[in-house]
Amino acid sequence: MSNIYGVWLKEQRLAAGLTQQELADMAVMTRSHIAHIEAGRRIPSKEDARRLDRALGTGNVLSSFLPDDGAAVADYFESARLLEQQAVMIREFALSFIPGILQTERYARAVLGTSFPPVSEEECDRLVVTRLERAKVLDDPVLPVVWALLDETVLRRMVGGPAVMEEQIAHIVRLVEAERVRVHVLPFTLGFHPLMDGMLTLMSFEDQPPVAYGEGLRMGKVHDSPSMVQELQGRYDLALSDALPLRESLALLRATAKDYGHHD
């Protein structure tokens, strides 16, 4: 996400002699939301931009020059990664492979090591370390609350071989048994469901509006438009309503891990 917009907002705020909290009060926003916009981690909604314009006396500049909401960013996951560290609730949907914060080291290495164009062993090591750092959000025993909705494809696709899959699924089972995460599986028998377009992450915060992050082939987008987030939340809720209950999902995870353990 480009930071030009955030830098310009900060310059206008400072020129007006306002602190972030003072601007937030005038624009009916939270200070942390202002901070994230200035840092380039968030794009304000159109209504937020209009309120900022009124507070700063900038006409309609901030609302007219909002970054293109449909544009993909080059480093497309960075904004989502930063938001992930601040979330109090994360709801994941995975279509093809295990979500990053739930991956084991060997599973992550199998995923990242088969990218194209190929990466060096040193670069793969760096990427794996970064992915494992993301998983540290689970070190806190309570927050963030994490739900994972997994298409059954995620369990059946043999990433890295049987031993890697057994270890990976067993890791998720332990997290569920410890009540650290909640996992539901969308079975093959369901057929088409509302989330088959790609992966989705929904994030909620203590003092900021919720966001959604969607990802496809070599592209990803953070959505903070209220209408878009609401639509994606609706899709997630609809798919979740058709998923296996927690106990049945856990039983399927255990059985699948056992099958991989017996694989020749």
Image (cartoon, rainbow, N blue to C red):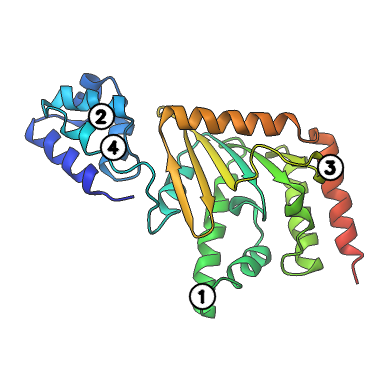
Could you tell me how many numbered marks the image carries? 4
SS for callout 2: helix
User: Left or right: 177 with respect to 23?
Assistant: right
- Going from N to C along the chain, the mark reached first, 2 or 4, is 4
Number of residues whose C-alpha sits closer than 10 Å to that of mark 3, classed few (under 14), some (14–19) or many (20 or more): few
Mark 2 to mark 1 CA distance (whole Å): 39 Å
Residue 194, compared with residue 117, is above or below; it is above
Mark 3 to mark 4 CA distance (whole Å): 46 Å
Where residue 144 sits in the image (x, y, percent)? Answer: 56, 37
- Going from N to C along the chain, the mark reached first, 1 or 4, is 4
Tell me the number on the disc at residue 49.
2
Give the residue type at disc 1: Pro
Rendered residue at 43%/55% (across/down): 76
Instruction: Name the residue tied to disc 4.
Output: 35
User: Left or right: 79 with respect to 256?
Assistant: left
Where residue 38 sits in the image (x, y, percent)? Answer: 25, 41
Instruction: Name the residue tied to disc 3.
Output: 189
Give the residue type at disc 2: Ala
Where residue 145 sits in the image (x, y, percent)? Answer: 60, 35
Tell me the number on the disc at residue 117.
1
Residue nearest the viewer, comparing 175 with 243: 243
Q: Nearer the viewer, mark 3 or mark 1?
A: 3
Mark 1 to mark 4 CA distance (whole Å): 36 Å
Number of residues whose C-alpha sits closer than 10 Å to that of mark 2, classed few (under 14), some (14–19) or many (20 or more): many
Q: Marks 4 and 3: in contact by CB < 8 Å?
A: no
